[in-house]
Image (cartoon, rainbow, N blue to C red):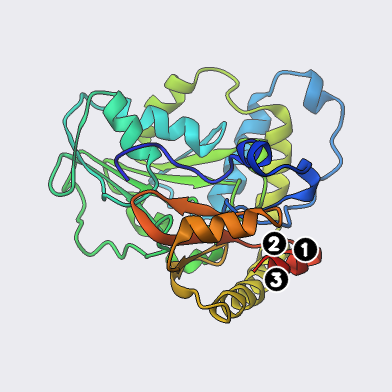
């Protein structure tokens, strides 16, 4: 995906083209959990006061516990994984970075903007998305070893659906490693703008300097801490997602789509003509994701429980 920077979302453009009100639309173009973490009650100072050091430390401690971060690795809270993606290429002087051709395209865009040469093999730096977006393929890591590169970025934004697949416990202690996490996907809190960088303390400290003081709002600090400490919700959500994604697979396969990948938050199907499928769905106010590089790929997120009927009617 080295051309245009394509994303899920874009609902305003869909509304402009197909009509309707925002509340009429079922946006399945993203991989965001449709049932977000329930927001806790927030005291007024979360909105009125500058975020304090104690709250930052408590949030990062909760992240360390949730992801079982080894003590040799550092943890940094940030205003969304996107802010980290933009800054990571600036950690080293520009060189050659290995990024797959078909993966989340913001990484390539960020490295190119920072002056790096992007390659499909080799390089002093490497980016892997685990699980991949949009294919859902897991990166096992057998082709990397400690200190084999100056920088290894592992984007685990979708990995919290299955904590057993994370590379945090092993690779976060390696020199040169930065692992990215997000509360926008599994927790469904994309609007909170909260992400984390985990890994090499020297690189994590440099990222912290780039972000400056108070990068995470007081609201995000408090909500993030509560969410990360709520393991009961996380376990129940994984069970629900497994049921919902099986329903999605069956629903699309009955209509002739071929399942070729995905995660428990989104599914990737092969169809005869993805643009035609997208238009058909859009006429019933269901928005999907297509890819210019693969005209047969259609990606769908999961609907909330009360809106499955809208998807089924649109198909």
Judged from the image, the secondary structure of the residue bearing numbered disc 3 is helix
Residue 109 percent coordinates (x, y): 34, 33
Tell me if residue 250 comes above or below residue 15 in the rendering. below
Q: Nearer the viewer, residue 62 or 282?
A: 282
Q: Nearer the viewer, residue 97 or 134?
A: 134
Whether tag 2 and tag 1 are in contact, CB under 8 A, the answer is: yes
Judged from the image, the secondary structure of the residue bearing numbered disc 1 is helix
Tell me if residue 198 comes above or below residue 133 in the rendering. above
- Left or right: where does residue 115 sit relative to residue 300? left
Query: Seen from this angle, which residue lies furthest left?
Result: 122
Gap in angstroms between the C-alphas marked 1 and 3: 9 Å
Whether tag 2 and tag 3 are in contact, CB under 8 A, the answer is: no
Q: Callout 1: few (<14), some (14-19), or many (20+) C-alpha neighbours within 10 Å?
A: few
Disc with the residue nearer the chain's start (2 vs 3): 2
Disc with the residue nearer the chain's start (1 vs 3): 1
- Left or right: where does residue 158 sit relative to residue 47? left
Residue 307 badge? 1
- Left or right: where does residue 189 sit relative to residue 170? right
Task: Name the residue tied to disc 2.
Answer: 303
Gap in angstroms between the C-alphas marked 2 and 1: 6 Å
Q: Residue at x 41, y 35 (%)?
A: 85
- Nearest to the eye among marks 2 and 3: give it: 3
Residue 1 percent coordinates (x, y): 32, 46
Gap in angstroms between the C-alphas marked 2 and 3: 11 Å
Q: Is residue 205 visible?
A: no
- Nearest to the eye among marks 1 and 3: give it: 3
Tell me if residue 194 comes above or below residue 243 in the rendering. above
Q: Callout 3: few (<14), some (14-19), or many (20+) C-alpha neighbours within 10 Å?
A: few
Q: Residue at x 45, y 68 (%)?
A: 271
Residue 312 badge? 3
């Amino acid at each position: 995906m080295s051309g245009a920077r394509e994303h899920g979302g874009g609902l305003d453009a869909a509304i402009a083209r197909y009509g309707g009100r925002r509340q009429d639309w079922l946006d399945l173009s993203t991989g965001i959990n449709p049932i977000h973490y329930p927001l806790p009650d927030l005291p007024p100072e979360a909105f009125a006061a500058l975020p304090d050091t104690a709250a930052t430390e408590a949030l990062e401690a909760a992240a360390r516990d949730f992801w079982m971060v080894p003590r040799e690795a550092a943890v940094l809270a940030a205003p969304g994984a996107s802010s980290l993606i933009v800054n990571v290429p600036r950690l080293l002087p520009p060189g050659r970075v290995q990024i797959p051709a078909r993966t989340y395209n913001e990484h390539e865009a960020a490295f190119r903007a920072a002056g790096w040469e992007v390659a499909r093999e080799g390089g002093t730096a490497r980016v892997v998305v685990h699980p991949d977006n949009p294919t859902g393929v897991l990166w096992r890591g057998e082709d990397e070893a400690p200190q084999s590169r100056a920088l290894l970025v592992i984007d685990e934004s979708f990995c919290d659906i299955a904590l057993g697949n994370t590379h945090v416990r092993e690779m976060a202690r390696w020199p040169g490693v930065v692992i990215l996490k997000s509360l926008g996907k599994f927790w469904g809190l994309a609007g909170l703008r909260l992400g984390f960088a985990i890994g090499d303390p020297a690189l994590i400290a440099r990222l912290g300097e780039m972000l400056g003081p108070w990068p995470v709002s007081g609201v995000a600090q408090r909500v993030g801490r509560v969410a990360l400490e709520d393991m009961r919700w996380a376990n129940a959500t994984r069970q629900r997602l497994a049921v919902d994604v099986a329903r999605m697979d069956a629903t699309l396969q009955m209509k002739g789509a071929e399942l070729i990948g995905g995660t428990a938050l989104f599914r990737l199907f092969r169809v005869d003509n993805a643009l035609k499928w997208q238009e058909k769905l859009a006429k019933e106010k269901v928005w999907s994701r297509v890819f210019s590089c693969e005209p047969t790929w259609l990606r769908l997120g999961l609907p909330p429980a009360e809106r499955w009927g809208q998807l089924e009617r649109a198909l």
